[in-house]
Each structure stands twice: as structure tokens, then as C-alpha cells.
Image (spheres, rainbow, N blue to C red):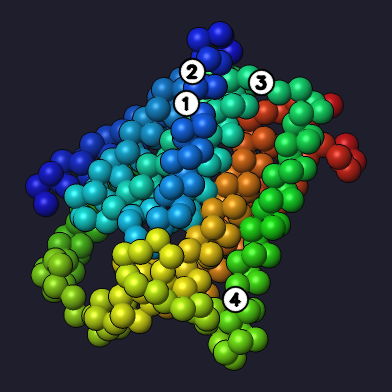
Amino acid sequence: MFILGIIALFMIITAIIAIEIKDLLAAIISLGAVGMGVAIGFVLLMAPDLAIVQIVVEVLALVFMVAVILKTTHVDETLDRTPLTLPVLAYAIFAIVFFILGVRALLLLPQFGVPIMKVASEYIRMGIPGTGAANLVAAVILDYRALDTLGEATVLFTAVIGVLTVMRKLGRKW
Amino acid sequence: MSLIVRKIASIIGGFIFLYGIYIVLHGHLTPGGGFAGGVIIAGSFVLFVLAYGTDESGEKKRFFIASIFESIGALFFIGIAFFGLFLGSLFFLNFLPQGLPLKLLSAGTIPLSNIAISIKVGAGLFSIFLALAATKYFLEE
């Protein structure tokens, strides 16, 4: 848990760097550091399925963004350097309130790693004899909850169609 | 790209593709699955496009093939679901025999669903890459 906290701090710092830095290539690399921190967090929480997906998607997204940067511009021209006392004050007050309430809420949660959900323990008990899949995650996402996977595939399909609609060349009117 | 990058890409690209297929086919046994394997397969194609570059006709052809494969993957996945509906009156019914756990041919329709999702995800991400980064065909007036 202590290492997880250090990684969370590292991710917060790199995210702030990614927002504030002026060179867009450096911002993208900082964003990649955030994604790799998420992947290490998944490994520490013993979720290798999610860690693999996170690493490969992060690498591919990083390649996409670097390729786009190489085709366009390096310099972020939208950064606003006016003094930020009022927003920073508002953020600080919100962070303090969120921290206090969050600590009180987290103390009420059950201990980490103790399952209290009846559905999840049923999946763990019946997963291998019920579906024959040794990987319980595959059994859940493609058998018990396959309809959710269909929805996720639909979301990806819609995202692809949206990107191609924005970026297309054929049929443009302007 | 330079000669070194092209040579290295031609050597390791096939291995990346093979690793993606391994992740997909062992999705019901080991961590991984259709989504991760599909992204790795798309990554091997992205490596080739970045190393060798494209022209307009090549991008058009690649985009056409990628869109066909994405539709095939989506229809394959939906087809598995409707097959379960017709055979056992349940959407996404696992209608194939389960087999022994920890064998490659086990778990009924789960490996087929993994293959369908990997085709869909790989082709979809590769067409997004073509539209965003390889803009000789897209976006050039």
C-alpha cells in the first residue's frame, strides 16, 4: 500500500507537468508516465489482465500522439500565463474538504481484499466448473457479462466512426 | 524512416504479430484476452506503417481492408450471441462443449469471442491510426 501511495504521488506530479509544460512532446511523454504508473498500480493490486491492457493501450496511444505531434507543431500556444491566485485558492479549499470527507468515507469501507459481494463469490466458486475457462476474468467478461462486452465493443465502434467522420476527406463540403 | 529502423521493424514486426495472436488464443487460460491481443496486433501494423511510410493509394487500400475487418469482427461477435439465442433461447449462451479446464480447446465460445473482439479492436485502432497520424489520404486538401 505504501508503494501504491508513492506511485499515486508520482502520477499526480507527472500529470501536473503534462498540463503545465509548454513543449507538447514533453507533455505527451509525461502523460505516458501517468499511464505507466496506472499499469504498475494494477500489477501491485494483482490485476494482470488490466495491467496488460493498460500497457499496450498506453504505448499505442503514445505512438499515435507522437505521430500527430511530428506532423503538426511542438509548441502549445494555448497556455495562459496570467496569475492564478483565485483558482488555486478554490482548488486548495476543495482539496482540503475532499481529503477530510474522503478519509472519513474510506475508514467506513470494509478491509481491502475481503469480498462482501455475494455475486462475486458465486463467480469465483462456479467460474471454472460452469464455463471451463481457467482465466476467471475471461469467464466473467465473455460469458457471465458478455452483454457488457458487447456494449464496450459498440462504444469502440462508435469511437472509430466518430474519428473517421471528423478526419475524412471524401464528402467534405468546405 | 532510416534503414536501421526499417530493418529492425522487418525483423521484429512478425514476432509482435505472433505474440498478439498468442495473447488472443490463450485469453481464456492466461491474463490477456481479445482486447489486449487486438491492440498488440494493431501495434505491429502501426510499426510497419511508421517504418516504411505510406502513399495515398496504400493508405486508401489499408483503410478499406481495415474497415472490412472491423465489420467482420463485429458481425462475428454478434453472430456468436445470436447463435446462442437460436440454439438455446438465451443471448450469449455458451453453446459449445466446455472441455477440460486448462486445455487450449476449452471454455466453449469464449475463445471464439476473444478472436472476434481481437479482429474488431485491432482493425478499429489501426483505422484510427491511419486517420489521425498517416494523413496523406485523410485531411490533405
Does residue A39 sit above or below B44 in this rendering?
below
Check whether the beta carbons of the residues at disc 3 and disc 1 lie within 8 A of each other.
Answer: no
| Residue shown at the point (64%, 79%) measured from the top left | B82
Between B47 and B133, the one lying in front of the other is: B47
Disc 4 target residue:
B81
Residue occupied by mark 1: B12
- Give the Cα separation between the discs numbered 3 and 1: 17 Å
Chain holding disc 1? B
Q: CA distance from mark 4 to mark 3?
A: 39 Å
Could you tell me residue B1's position as x and y percent?
Answer: 58, 13
Given the image, what chain letter belongs to the residue carrying mark 2?
A: B
Earlier along the polypeptide chain: callout 2 or callout 4?
Answer: 2
**Would you identify the image quadrant in which residue B88 lies?**
bottom right
Nearest to the observer: residue A142 or residue B15: B15
Tag 1 near tag 2, CB within 8 Å: yes
Q: Which three-letter amino acid code belongs to the residue tagged 3?
A: Gly
